[in-house]
Image: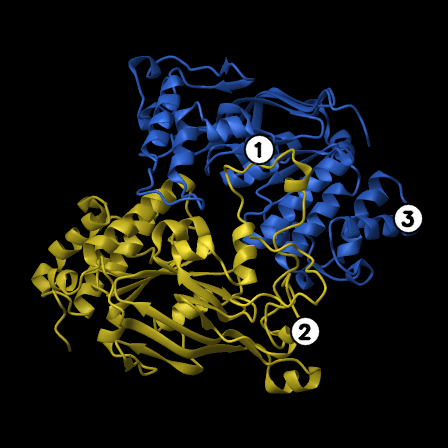
Chain colours: A yellow, B blue
Amino acid sequence: MNAPQTPEESVTAENPAAPAAEPLLTARDLAVYFPVFSKLVARLHHVERLLRAVDGVDLEVRRGEALALVGESGSGKSTLALALAGLQPVDHGQIQLEGRVLPSHRSRDDRRRIQMVFQDPYSSLNPRLTVGSMLGELLRVHHVVPRDQVRSVSADLIRLVGLDEGALGAYPRQFSGGQRQRVAIARALALRPEILVADEPVSALDVSVQATILNLLRDLRQELGLTLLLISHNLAVVRHLCDRVAVMYLGRIVEVAPTEQLFRDPRHPYTRGLLAAIPRLASNTAGDPAGEAGPPALVGDPPSPLNIPAGCRFRTRCPIAQPRCEREDPALVNGPGEPGHLAACHYAFTPVPATTSAPTVPEQA
Amino acid sequence: MTESQTGNVLEVEDLRVRIASRRGVVRAVDGVSFEVPRGEALGLVGESGSGKSMTLKAVLGVLPAEAQVASGQVRLDGTDLLTLDQHTLNRVRGPKISMIFQEPMSALNPVMRVGQQISEGPRIHLGYSRAKAQERTLELMRRVGIPDPERRYRAYPHEFSGGMRQRVMIAIALSCEPEIILCDEPTTALDVTIQDQILRLLARLCQESGVSLVFVTHDLPVVAQVCQQVAVMYGGQIVEQGDVRDVLLDPRHPYTLGLVRSAPDVEYVQDSLRPIPGAPPSLIDPPDGCRFHPRCDFVEDDCRTGTVALRLLAGDRATRCLHSERCQQALAADRAAQ
């Protein structure tokens, strides 16, 4: 059993303000499939047997950064997060931690290093354990601290997330939603992870409570030098908290860029649609026929992950789709002169050929 | 339907809803009044427990068994719905007033074909023949943007995506040409691109058919996109009311200000979000004076006692705050700091 680091070591080991270029966690051609029909049924009905939830993902998480994974439901972002955290078996590809390939059965220490916070704090906490026993069990099982320090370290943890020490004796039902999410964060931090994977950590909370949890996550990242992987559909939250954003669509990553660059200059038509679809407080268009009731940012529903279109998987909803998109599946490539800005679109960094018919939805500047 | 734009479709006056619980009587809705002009959309915003959904349910007369309307009036075209018996009420729901719920999968009948569910209303309320109702259903399905309606008519709700199910809900709500549709968080369960489609659809229907909307949501930007008027609810009461743009961009109640300040904005990055301290009040034993005073930054002695009434401000808006000028000062300071 590896001796766990003290928190001071993990904080000072690297400078969180300047993330090193070396990736901490890497996914290489990662795929997760869910069998939804038996082989027989699939053959009889000529349907796809496997739901390709994550379908060939390459992703690097750098030490000390906050990376967001955004996309609509069914895009595979939660499955990818579970796979990275080691909670979901992988069907293809590999996951590397500091360049070392993680086996399908991870060692206890590898599991300790990546911890997760889930969306719904009402179902992710054991209702029959007090907060103190929940944290104590983790600390003992993983030998994080000597047994005689379990109590005091639990108290430190609960104070770290902004709760009162008295919370240790309470059951989850005695807390509000925001307080439960604090407990869930304390539980994830108990093992002194290097990477915190947070799957929609504020979606189940009221607006005014969301702010407290977002502030807490940001402060913890600075204090502990945590690497944060945030899964969210809320782009405002992402912009507030994250350094880089990866956009997912139907099991693939379609664009990766530093946050401000993505918001300023999105290159994938899906990202552009996603950004345009966000209701904005300041730009009220009510009463303005062209703005309010005009065409939506993106038409149609995402296709079923059981029936992924050939070629580019976004082409069925794409306002600038070309014949080429039907034939060739675009790779996630770096834009010329834009290091760190990757997009999986034939026309992300080159203009759309002018000879073809006009797109149905005007492209944004 | 090109009726005059004047006059109110719905007038709610001093509505009070009580819920009996073991720990006492919960005053879930405590003196709520608002009007919805014809063809306009009113947003009701607030956090969970603020009474916004209870208000809607009381208006439609579908309160849960333990909840009761204690007093008030709900006038639809001048008729007080609260005095109607069940039979008369059933003839109002559908042709005059209808509702769209948050989760379409639980609001639709899973074992009935979608087409039948949409045509049920016209058959019963408008006396349409089977063939005429089907014709109307297909037209409605086209209007709400369901592709291939002839084939989809015979489908069941589980064969639809979330966005398509919500379109079916909207078609049902529209089926008897109501004057007002109550929407309870209609897009909360949907993805942002689908939400965008549904919001635009609702806005278009509002313009085309002159139907009015009451739109309950916790999402301020959604209200900004759909509604002309907004009422902010806190602790069972309306604390601020007025034009959407005025209220959300220039709030005059510290709770509205708190909501606006605590939400991250996609347009720019704040250093730090400012959550509202504390927790919402108990509705069994609400605090004296202003209900928001225990959480308010601007609290003064006069906020702690008596009752604070909704008072009118210039510009056709109202606030339940005695020191609303403090909000203006705080906002001015915010803008200067940016």
User: Where residue B235 sits: x, y (%)?
Assistant: 44, 28
A144 left or right of B105 in image: left
Q: Secondary structure at mark 3?
A: helix
Q: Look at the image and tell me in which quarter the N terminus of chain B lies.
A: top right
Q: Look at the image and tell me in which quarter the C terminus of chain B lies.
A: top left
| Quarter of the figure with residue A197 | bottom left
Q: Are marks 2 and 3 in contact (CB under 8 Å)?
A: no
User: Where residue A231 sits: x, y (%)?
Assistant: 41, 60
Disc 2 is attached to a residue of which chain?
A
Q: Which mark is residue B132?
A: 3
What's the residue type where badge 2 is placed? Pro
Q: Are marks 2 and 3 on the same chain?
A: no
Which residue is label 1 attached to?
B43
A355 left or right of A67 in image: right
Q: Are marks 3 and 1 in contact (CB under 8 Å)?
A: no
| Quarter of the figure with residue B191 | bottom right
B195 left or right of A46 in image: left
Relative depth, front residue between B275 and A69: A69
Relative depth, front residue between B225 and B239: B225
User: Where residue B53 sits: x, y (%)?
Assistant: 55, 36
Q: Which mark is residue B102?
A: none
The span from disc 2 to disc 3 (Cα, nearest Å) is: 43 Å
